[in-house]
């Protein structure tokens, strides 16, 4: 794991110093933006705050928009920075302030501490730190709630890279305070995924590039789950439809070298959804950011997409959700698939004499095969299928199976 941290740190440093010219321009941009913050209007506030937690003075930057009056309880967005980064960089790079100015919510940017490689981080379980960042986050929420009028049912956690890992960790370990999650270039540790103890539906939006060289899209053994596994975990946990709907996002920027697909797992508990923006040829970057690092997509703005998604929910689910309007999920007793796992073929017990049309999908919703099946012709040949998981759809109902 220490070797991984060293490699991870090196990859992020490489990403940050794409060229000496880019590094200089980015640094100047961050410095200029920081100076401008100091001269913002008196009605808008960027507050440098600290709290004491677990014997450590922890710092944060809180953005309070001019529209905030204190008379109405408003949402709170926790915006976590990435590994090697800091709260100021995240406030500028993954910017929600202009959205907060009109939507009326507070944005807090927690500052990580130094791990045993002397690198700023949030402790998500990589083995290089013992800092209690879950406890710190809870204490920070409580501290801000005592000072500001915050809607306790609308607290959201988002983050970049290590901040995305942290957001998922909070969804698992502090779900009593978190209504929805947004992650850009982040993922989950396999151990976090397996041991997740979220106590209510958790709407999730995940934005990730397919050629991310720091947090690989397909995962990395031992330290990060694949994005597909992360999406399947939350879609299953939320009881969403197992096949996502797919929308191709308009390629409005032809010079960024990337395109975007939007996958939506719908009809979860309390109208929850899991949404994934898959950035083909996107790198370890924040789409739409003012800081134009190589591999940044400009067909979408990650901050806008995240807010549009998470703001629909409170801790009870979709605001104004009417579960009666959500289509019923598939029944578990209607048909059975065997053997499962299978090798060359599957058999289907339909429990009826009628014939049915069937479809087989990948776990990402791509239609791979279709045909007609009955109890007198119940075998489906899978000899040409790759060893992985699939979905069989019959009469609007689904069964998962695995090809070995």
Image (cartoon, rainbow, N blue to C red):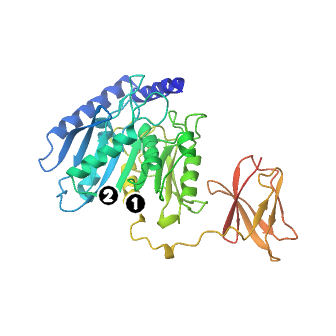
Residue most extreme to the right: 376
Whether residue 256 is visible, yes or no, is: no
Q: Position of residue 173 (x, y in %)?
A: 45, 47
**Residue 243 lies in what quarter of the image?**
bottom right
Please name the residue that numbered disc 1 is placed on.
Answer: 315
Q: Position of residue 311 (x, y in %)?
A: 36, 59
| Residue 228 relative to residue 30: left or right | right
CA distance separating discs 1 and 2: 8 Å
Mark 2 Cα within 10 Å, few/some/many (few <14, many 20+)? many
**Which residue is found at the position 50% from the left and 48% from the top?**
259
Q: Nearest the camera: 30 or 155?
A: 155
Q: Nearest the camera: 342 or 207?
A: 342
- Relative to residue 358, is residue 302 depicted above or below? above
- Relative to residue 285, is residue 311 depicted above or below? below
Secondary element under disc 2, as helix, strand or loop, is: strand
Mark 1 Cα within 10 Å, few/some/many (few <14, many 20+)? many
Please name the residue that numbered disc 2 is placed on.
Answer: 152
Whether label 1 touches label 2, CB < 8 Å: yes
1 or 2: tag closer to the N-terminus: 2
């Amino acid at each position: 794991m220490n070797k991984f941290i060293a490699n991870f740190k090196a990859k992020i440093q490489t990403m940050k110093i794409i060229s000496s010219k880019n590094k200089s321009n980015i640094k100047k941009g961050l410095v200029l933006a920081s100076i401008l913050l100091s001269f913002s209007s008196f009605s808008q506030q960027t507050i440098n705050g600290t709290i004491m937690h677990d014997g450590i003075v922890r710092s944060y930057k809180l953005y309070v928009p001019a529209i905030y009056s204190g008379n109405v309880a408003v949402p709170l967005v926790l915006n976590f920075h990435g590994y090697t980064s800091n709260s100021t960089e995240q406030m500028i790079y993954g910017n929600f302030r202009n959205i907060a100015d009109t939507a009326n919510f507070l944005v807090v940017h927690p500052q990580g501490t130094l791990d045993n490689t002397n690198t700023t981080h949030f402790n998500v379980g990589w083995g290089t730190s013992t800092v209690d960042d879950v406890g710190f986050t809870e204490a920070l929420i409580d501290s801000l709630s005592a000072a500001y009028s915050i809607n306790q049912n609308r607290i959201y956690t988002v983050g970049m890279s290590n901040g995305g890992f942290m957001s998922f960790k909070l969804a698992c370990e502090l779900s009593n305070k978190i209504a929805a999650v947004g992650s850009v270039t982040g993922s989950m540790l396999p151990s976090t995924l397996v041991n997740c103890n979220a106590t209510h539906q958790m709407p999730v939006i995940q934005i990730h590039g397919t050629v991310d060289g720091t947090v690989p899209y397909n995962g990395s053994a031992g330290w990060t789950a694949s994005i597909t596994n992360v999406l399947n975990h939350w879609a299953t946990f939320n009881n969403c439809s197992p096949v996502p709907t797919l929308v191709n996002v308009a390629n409005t920027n032809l010079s960024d070298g990337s395109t975007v697909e939007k996958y939506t797992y719908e009809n979860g508990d309390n109208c929850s959804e899991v949404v994934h923006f898959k950035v083909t040829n996107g790198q370890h970057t924040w789409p739409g950011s003012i800081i134009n690092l190589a591999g940044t997509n400009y067909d979408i703005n990650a901050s806008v997409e995240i807010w549009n998604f998470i703001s629909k929910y409170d801790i009870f689910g979709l605001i104004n959700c009417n579960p009666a309007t959500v289509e019923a999920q598939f029944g578990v007793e209607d048909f059975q698939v065997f053997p499962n796992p299978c090798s060359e073929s599957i058999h289907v017990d339909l429990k009826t004499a009628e014939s049915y049309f069937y479809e087989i999908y990948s776990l990402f919703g791509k239609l791979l095969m279709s045909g007609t099946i009955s109890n007198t012709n119940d075998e489906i040949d899978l000899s040409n299928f790759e060893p992985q998981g699939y979905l069989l759809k019959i009469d609007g109902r689904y069964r998962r199976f695995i090809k070995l």
